Every structure is written in C-alpha cells, then in structure tokens.
Amino acid sequence: MPFTIATWNINSVRLREGLVAKLLTDEAPDILCLQECKAPVDKMPLQAFAALGYTHCVARGQKGYNGVAILSKLPIEDAGDRDFATLGHARHVAARLENGVTIHNFYVPAGGDIPDREQNPKFGQKLDFLTDMQHWFAAERPHKAILVGDLNIAPREDDVWSHKQLLKIVSHTPIEVEQLGRTQEAGRFVDITRQDIPQGLLYSWWSYRAADWDAADKGRRLDHVWATPDIAGAAHSSRVLRDARGWEQPSDHAPVFATFDL
C-alpha cells in the first residue's frame, strides 16, 4: 500500500496549528513529521490533528525549544528516541508502521552563526550530534527505515543559492557537509529527494531576514527524506511545497514530501 510522508520544521506547532491543519487538509499526507514544535507533548494540539484523521501520534517535546512529532493516519507504534550527544534535547523520535518500516524524525542542531567549535559551542554540539548519529547507525545497520527531518545542512552545491558565498556559512561549510555524508553512509541511506530530483537548484528554507523571500530566492535545502537501500527503490513523487513559505505567518521552512509504494 503506498503512503506519502511529509517533513516540516513548523517553528512552533502551537503558533502555527492552523498551518498544520491547512497542510493536513489540503495535501493530506499519510504521515507528517514535525520539528521544532517548541512545546511539551501535553501542550501540542494533537487532538485538533486527530479530528482531521491523524489519530496516531508519537512525539517528544520540551518547553519553548526543539520538539519532534510524527502524526499519522496509519497505525504506528512508538519506536523510541535517543538523546544524541547527550544534549538533553527533544530532537529525535521514531515510529514503526505495521509493515515493519521504521520512521526516524530528526531535528539536528542549527549550530549557531560561527563555524568554529572553540568560538561557538553550539557548532561543536552540532558536529557531536552528527558523530553520535554516525556511530549509532553504523552499529544499528538499519533496514526498512526512513529518516526525515530538518538536518540543518544543505550538502550539495545546488542545494544553496550560492555555493561560493556560503562555504563559510553554517549549514554549508565543508566540515558539516562531510559529517552529513558520513552519517548518510553509516546508515547506507539514499537521499530520496535527490534520487527523484537529481538536477537543479532546490531549497526548503528561506530566511525571515529577506524583505521578499520569494523574489530574492536565497534558499537552502535543509530538510531531507532518506531511506535505506532495501526500500529506496519504492520511493517516488518527491516535492517541496514552496507555496507554504508564503502562507500567513509562515515557518521559514517548507514541507518536503515523498511517496513510498510499500
């Protein structure tokens, strides 16, 4: 049975409950993975989403920061979470579908503004988080797994508006790109979005700082859908819902979709 999965950094699920409802109503993915929910689980508007048909949910939250949730029309069971780099942050949660596919929802640390762990501890936390992911996936050797989320790294030259100008900007520095590549290799993950859309500029995030984000179009592809090789061939129809960045009081991220025939 095919299912469509979407991933979206919502930047406060309480503030943007209406936008989530709009996406669930208009686009109707079978599964929606949210990041940066910025609320404890008991404060997330999960009942409102259940009323729209998303009656299954696993989530991890904390007050004011981070937070990840998996909303689903399909039955799912809680498959746990991991505190990567022992930061004490709600940045990972996993769910398992009845067909045995495990979905990992990640919110990798943004890493601050200075790409130097000595000057900026947040950058060190980001690198440590990725290293811990590498070690875990290397040990786990996941199969029938989908990894989605805001990974806060745009790895390819055509994942940013200017490769040359962003080489020293956090999210596109060589060390981050290398670390993300190692993480992908550790789990043998396939980048589904780029499997489907192999060429051309592609973004999922546009800064709030731009007076006209659409006209400036200085974006980055920070949000990803990956899958293990045993199910990567079943994926298709990847897309970024760019229009969502232009909704009223939007997140600075747009949802990313993929469909799996499993």
Image (cartoon, grey):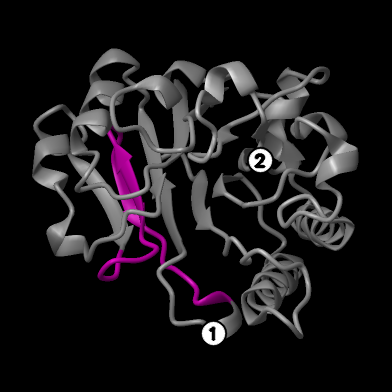
In the displayed structure, 262 sits above or below 163; it is: above
Residue 30, quarter of the rendered image = top left
Residue 121, quarter of the rendered image = bottom right
Q: Counting residues from the N terminus, which is met first, the one under dot 1 or under dot 2? A: 1
Q: Which residues are magenta?
A: 61-84
Q: Residue at x 26, y 30 (%)?
A: 19
Q: Would residue 241 be seen by someone viewing this image from the given angle?
A: no
Q: Is residue 84 left or right of residue 174?
A: left
- Residue 155 is situated, as x and y percent measured from the top left of the image, at 79, 44
State the separation of the CA atoms marked 1 and 2: 25 Å
Type of amino acid at the residue the image marks with label 1 = Thr
Tag 2 residue: 227
Residue 141 falls inside the magenta stretch: no
Q: Secondary structure at mark 2?
A: strand
Tag 1 residue: 86
Q: Residue at x 14, y 47 (%)?
A: 45
Type of amino acid at the residue the image marks with label 2 = Ala
Look at the image and tell me in which quarter the N terminus lies. Answer: top left
